[in-house]
Image (cartoon, rainbow, N blue to C red):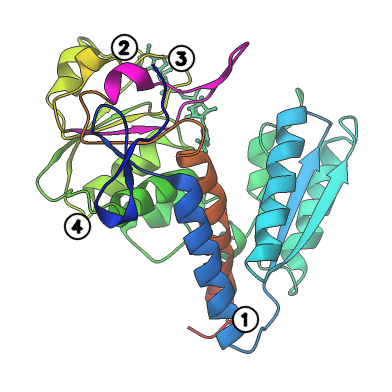
């Protein structure tokens, strides 16, 4: 069995061999990046700048950050990368983040997570002003999300919402199960799905949930945000449901998601590939957030 697409579907999408519409994150990322570039050009190309902070030499983190800068350039944005050695120390990292926070030429700040062992990530995050918090992770950003106030929302949850919009997946009155309750993905995504205007009826599942299979099988939308390879099987999925894979597990066979793609694509109505689904959307939404941040700071026309 292969996840090679075989035929075309609505919304310019393609179908999997089992007939599900493939929600192509690479394609949507490219569309969003092109739209951002067009918006910036149309505004006379005012500088919009993303700054990343990378501490240590973790391979995947280096790749993620590099990719963010490549895509930022394609979107017509400036970007800076502050690289610090793993033993830089808490106060040096805080100094760098505080300087970016105070610099009016920097509109978005992202501290690449996880920081090496021994760092207090929460203390670093609190230094990022809400209007520059392009990862949407600070208490202020989370508070704004809960209260429905304008602000910056986490890139991965926002990317899931953009995929649902782009592929015309109905949410109003539909049942959604989000598996995972982290501050990074599960919790903010649950809030976004339940928001007025989106109007899904949301259940948050986690490691203590009983009968995950039965719970998911009742849902119109299932999101796996756990990091356990193949957790979501065909038995978890109602025929025609939308299945979104956020989880990432690194195996000898490469990157694997929470969803058993080969089995689930034969049952689902829409499905994301892994890789090539939510990952590229996380980067697209980081750049979308950077433009929103510039607007919130009055550095870009609304
Ligand atoms: P966390 O480890 O913070 O959260 C994982 C969640 O999964 C927890 O809420 C945990 O429950 C729950 N969980 C663990 N085991 C089970 C189980 N057997 N059944 C149901 N729920 C379970 O991870 P993150 O939220 O930060 O990330 C989740 C995954 O998404 C990771 O694989 C990460 O690499 C990936 N990721 C992918 C991104 C992308 O762009 N595609 C971006 C960010 C993350 P409990 O709370 O009870 O412990």
Residue sitting at 20 percent across and 35 percent down? 269
Q: Secondary structure at mark 3?
A: loop
Q: Nearer the viewer, mark 4 or mark 3?
A: 3
Q: How many residues crowd mark 1 within 10 Å: few (<14), some (14–19), many (20+)? A: some
Q: Is residue 131 left or right of residue 7?
A: right
Q: Which residues are magenta?
A: 241-265
Which residue corresponds to mark 2?
A: 208
> Disc 4 versus disc 1: distance between alpha carbons?
29 Å
Which residue corresponds to mark 1?
A: 299
Q: Is residue 276 magenta?
A: no
Figure quadrant of residue 208 = top left
Figure quadrant of residue 197 = bottom left
Q: How many residues crowd mark 2 within 10 Å: few (<14), some (14–19), many (20+)? A: few
> Disc 4 versus disc 3: distance between alpha carbons?
33 Å
- Label 2, ligand 1: CB separation under 8 Å: yes
Residue sitting at 45 percent across and 39 percent down? 277
Labelled pair 1, 2 in contact (Cβ < 8 Å)? no
Which residue corresponds to mark 4?
A: 196
Answer with mark 4 or mark 1, whichever residue precedes in sequence. 4
Question: Where the N terminus falls, by quadrant?
Answer: top left
Q: Nearer the viewer, mark 2 or mark 3?
A: 3
Q: Secondary structure at mark 4?
A: loop
> Disc 4 versus disc 2: distance between alpha carbons?
28 Å
> Disc 2 versus disc 3: distance between alpha carbons?
18 Å
Figure quadrant of residue 145 = bottom left
Q: Nearer the viewer, residue 187 or 3?
A: 3
- Label 3, ligand 1: CB separation under 8 Å: no
Answer with mark 2 or mark 3, whichever residue precedes in sequence. 2
> Disc 1 versus disc 3: distance between alpha carbons?
43 Å
Which residue corresponds to mark 3?
A: 229
């Amino acid at each position: 069995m292969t996840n090679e697409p075989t035929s075309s579907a609505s919304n310019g999408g393609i179908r999997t061999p089992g007939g599900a519409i493939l929600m192509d994150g690479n394609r949507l990322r490219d569309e969003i990046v092109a739209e951002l570039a067009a918006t910036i050009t149309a505004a006379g190309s005012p500088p919009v700048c993303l700054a990343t902070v990378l501490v240590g030499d973790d391979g995947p983190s280096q790749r993620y950050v590099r990719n963010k800068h490549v895509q930022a350039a394609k979107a017509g944005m400036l970007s800076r990368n502050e690289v610090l050695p793993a033993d830089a120390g808490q106060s040096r990292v805080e100094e760098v983040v505080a300087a970016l926070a105070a610099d009016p030429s920097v509109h978005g700040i992202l501290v690449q997570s996880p920081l090496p062992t021994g760092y207090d990530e929460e203390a670093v995050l609190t230094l990022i002003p809400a209007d520059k918090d392009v990862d949407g992770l600070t208490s202020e950003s989370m508070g704004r999300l809960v209260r429905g106030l304008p602000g910056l929302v986490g890139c991965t949850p926002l990317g899931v919402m953009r995929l649902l919009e782009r592929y015309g997946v109905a949410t109003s009155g539909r049942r959604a199960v989000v598996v995972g309750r982290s501050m990074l993905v599960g919790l903010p995504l649950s809030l976004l799905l339940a928001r007025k205007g989106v109007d899904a009826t949301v259940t948050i599942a986690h490691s203590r949930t009983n009968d995950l299979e039965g719970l998911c099988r009742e849902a119109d939308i299932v999101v796996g945000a756990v990091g356990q390879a193949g957790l979501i099987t065909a038995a978890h999925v109602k025929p025609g449901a939308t299945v979104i894979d956020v989880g990432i597990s690194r195996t000898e066979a490469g990157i694997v998601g929470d969803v058993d793609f080969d089995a689930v694509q034969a049952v689902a109505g829409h499905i994301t590939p892994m890789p090539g689904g939510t990952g590229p959307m996380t980067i697209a939404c980081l750049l979308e957030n950077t433009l929103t941040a510039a607007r919130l700071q009055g550095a870009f026309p609304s």
